[in-house]
Image (cartoon, rainbow, N blue to C red):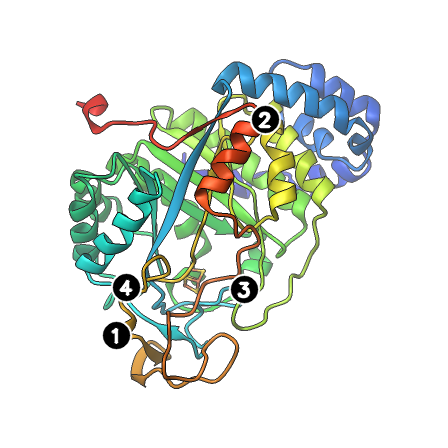
Amino acid sequence: MSFVAEFNSLPLDALVKQSLAGSAAAARDAIGRPDKSLADFAALISPAASELLEAMGRRAHAMTQQRFGKVVRLFAPLYLSNECINNCKYCGFSRDNAILRVTLTADEVLQEARALKAQGFRNILLVAGEHPKFVSNSYLEDCVAALHPDWPSISLEVGPMETAEYRPLVAAGADGLVVYQETYDRTIYAAMHTAGPKRNFDWRLETPERGYAAGFRRLGISPLYGLADWRHEAISVAAHAAHLLRNCWKASLTISLTRLRPCAGEFQPLTHMTDRELAQLVCAFRMMFPDVGLVLSTRESPKLRNGLVPLGVTLMSAGSHTEPGGYTGAGKEHIHQTVRGRIVGTASGSSEWAPATPPALNATEQFHIADVRSPQEVADLIRQLGYEPVWKDWDAALTA
Ligand code: SF4
């Protein structure tokens, strides 16, 4: 059974209500139960459980060290293209935003990758908007094949595909697939995605399973906190994770902790999740899923990232740029504006997100990052916290 069928029968509203009304005693019981149910997870993220945060933090810390050791893996996003045919209200790359756009050539992708390699990275996440003309499957395959000799771990965060379309990408050297559902609330999903293929909620929800069938051995999922009620999202993604752990058991799974950030289009979050609630959620995920990796990006501030590492974060990005060409200026010669998916000329915008030219230094970013420390600064901080930063944790030879 695909997750869509399971998702449709989940008593999500009841679980959210149960969470909101939960007691500290119920949360204590949930902490102590070895095999936790979704109801236990709802108790762990309840307002009442907030008073147990210190105890939850100690438990989550111990479990993380037991399962993952004292290491934090580092990765970098490499944006290939910010062209997109979808309108997602919360995203800077949204089709109707008048921003500066570019799709890097394979050579420019290699230029960006070399800069990341020089900083120490060996684990890379290739990100692109969804645009079949600019970001075709063969383009992605060419990029992955060009990077594969130097990059032991290559993950993709691109438009969803059929299983058969994913297979050549896996064969070319991609081993991870990241797909955020954005929101698990169907009504809000419909309101946020006003044009483009991304409007199909179910197709997106089944993407990790199609990727697994194609051979990806790392899967990453997440909502984007700031759209629907965060407890609704957290319980949904917990159910999704449990389904994938049961059905895609050969793959390793990560859940990202992704909150909305400012971007072109000036979208304002619809809901709010506090830093303390995010910390509680990290602990709850760790206790619910001892072996699942938890990902924290540069969307969060240095102070919060420092504080969340000991609670259970296992994978962090660092020094990120969220625009194509952001690391080296690659591709700036062919930056242009695109309106409704069509190139309309050279860069000539005049907003904060699309500054007037000349010269446009870079294409427009997807969102502002909050942690602007360099990768080395982040690595030093990880060491100061008593952990080892890990730049490479896989070698293609291990799959042979
Ligand atoms: S979230 Fe993805 S699909 Fe939506 S506009 Fe941004 S890049 Fe395009």
| Foreground pick, 193 / 217 | 217
The x, y position of residue 323, in whole percent, is 39, 62
Q: Please tell me how crowded label 4 is: few (under 14), some (14-19), or many (20+) other residues with Cα within 10 Å.
A: many
The x, y position of residue 114, in whole percent, is 25, 48
Looking at the rendered structure, the secondary structure element under dot 4 is loop
Check mark 4 vs ligand 1: CB closer than 8 Å? yes or no.
no
Earlier-in-chain disc, 2 versus 4: 2
The residue that label 4 is drawn on is: 330
Q: Which mark is residue 333?
A: 1
| Foreground pick, 5 / 301 | 301
Type of the residue with mark 3: Tyr
The residue that label 2 is drawn on is: 286
The alpha-carbon separation of the residues under discs 1 and 3 comes to 28 Å
Asked whether the beta carbons under mark 1 and mark 3 sit within 8 Å of each other, the answer is no
Q: The N terminus is located in which quarter?
A: top left
Q: Nearer the viewer, mark 1 or mark 3?
A: 1
State whether residue 393 appears in this view: yes
Earlier-in-chain disc, 3 versus 2: 3
